[in-house]
Amino acid sequence: MGIRSGAQYVKGLQDGRSVYVNGEVVSDVTDDPAFKGIITTMAGLYDAQHDERYIDTLTYVSPTSGERVSTTLLPARTAEEMGARLRCEYLRTDLTYGLMGRIPDFVNAFILDAAYSLAYMGKDEAAARVRDYLEFLRANDLSTTHALIDPQTDRSKPDAPQEAVQIVDETSDGITVRGARLLSTLAPVAEEIVVGPFVPRRPGEEKFALAFAIPANTPGLKIVCREPYDTGGSAFDQPLTSRFEEGDAVLLFDDVFVPRERVFVGGDVEAYNGLIPNGPGYTGLQAAVRGAAKLRFLTGLAGVVARVNGRTQSPRHQEEIGELVAYVGVAEGLLQGAALDVARRIEARERARAGETPAPRPGEPVVDTPIGLSATMVFFPNVLARAVDVVRMVAGSGVIAMTEKDFHNPELTGLLERFMHGPDVPAEERLRVMRLAWDATGGQFGSRQALYERLYSGDPIGNRIRFFGLPKRSECEDLVLRLLAS
Ligand SMILES: Cc1cc2nc3c(=O)[nH]c(=O)nc-3n(C[C@H](O)[C@H](O)[C@H](O)COP(=O)(O)OP(=O)(O)OC[C@H]3O[C@@H](n4cnc5c(N)ncnc54)[C@H](O)[C@@H]3O)c2cc1C
């Protein structure tokens, strides 16, 4: 089939999945107002693939099927192919302003990493199953999401909790799994759910060492959503909530059968633990592209808020917004580096496999963790939090703004126009900007976004401690020792 339209995506969601919202089963997510905005946004992304302005960026012709398929599934190896992936991810995150943390591109990149990683570790059967799955996704253009984290039943222990998803039965046809996984952003409106590793498993935890993919309507899978934030507010009042509320859900596996061909890791602790570290870095690259898109958006928002509040001449706000503009420059440069880094990593491994062990040439830094991963684990959580803070402090109390209905109440319209305008900015425009700023940085949507940016790439403290343990630190320390010894 190849690429689908928005209408085909919407029809695909009418699949009898078990989604729970506010304690009730939603029989058809496409008919529930809570998901209307995000489904429209996702459908727009599908339709964009057919738009002649975007088709060559968002799609490519599959050499296996001859059909146009999503560039998010391109197994890029060369610098040129990485450039094609980068442009596609850039465009898709630009179209969604970086506000969809779990746009399916993320999981598509994760699966590409998994295919490469398993092959690299010599897990050939598993790698072949992941490659078949990639081909299936290309052919059917399905929306994907994932859940990597165990329930927080007792974090004082390093072991996999007994409540985590585990194998409870196994036959030659597949495995049956039981337990919980979280948190699955986009799950209510995604078609394929991928369960994969994040926290390492230990010997003896084989039944918890799992990576697999299943359709969202698989019997026994219950998608329990947090309460939706899109409660029908207008695009004026909630310009972001009404379009980009992805939803988050806990996944409950109540004896779910996973066919053998979709079990990528089923009990192999080594494969489970090595799956993420051995990937060349497609996932980190996509996450960095998305982070950069959101940084551009928040930087722009700070500038527009300053304009409607008459703050553009204030040195303090110029300095703060200028700082964000500089971060945008760093972020955009970083993307180019991250894309090249993935290609370089693949090339180095292929040369190593061919028996070559190329030493770094003088002047070539050793990159011991993918650039995209460093960016998403440390750089973006910091700068995005800073950007939110700048928007808040430029806006001041203006974000506590009245609604569209207030503005259009005939008793108020004239008064609001008279008293609530900005410098050469009509009251309605200023109000719209303030509502946008509140949606982006406060309210339920904005608060959840802030938490997401801090946590989505894992426990931020643990991440930094991992960087402390990298050989890069010794490389930096060697500089100092060399100087002291000279
Ligand atoms: C909005 C949102 C959306 C998400 N979407 C997804 C998704 O789509 N897919 C997915 O797989 N995951 C998703 N996640 C989950 C995310 O990956 C986890 O939140 C993250 O890995 C941290 O794990 P945790 O929530 O279990 O927190 P914990 O690991 O329990 O950490 C909680 C806090 O404790 C601190 N901490 C941890 N260990 C220690 C220690 N030893 N000593 C002191 N402090 C410690 C951490 O720094 C953190 O502040 C999402 C999370 C959020 C908030």
Image: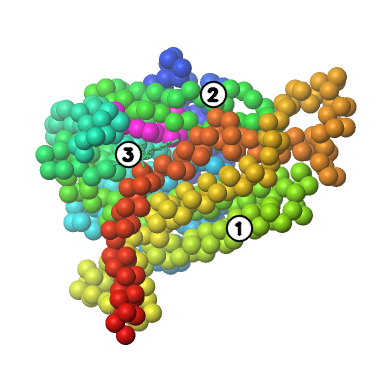
Q: Position of residue 404 (x, y in %)?
A: 74, 26
The reply, left or right, for residue 249 in relation to residue 168 is: right
The magenta-colored residue range is 180-191
Q: Disc number at residue 34? A: 2
Work out how far the residue at label 1 is from the one at label 2, CA to CA, in angstroms.
37 Å
Q: Nearer the viewer, residue 139 or 23?
A: 23
User: Which of disc 2 and disc 3 is earlier in sequence?
Assistant: 2
Q: Disc number at residue 323? A: 1
Quickly name the residue at label 3. Answer: 148
Work out how far the residue at label 3 is from the one at label 2, CA to CA, in angstroms.
25 Å
Residue drawn where x is 45% and y is 65% of the image: 337
Q: Where is residue 63 in the image (x, y as percent from the top left)?
A: 40, 57
Ligand 1 under 8 Å from disc 3 Cβ: yes
Q: Quadrant of ligand 1?
A: top left
Mark 3 belongs to which amino acid?
A: Leu
Q: How crowded is mark 1: few (under 14 residues within 10 Å), some or many (20 or more)?
A: some
Residue 23 falls in which quadrant of the image?
Answer: top left
Q: Nearer the viewer, residue 362 or 310?
A: 310
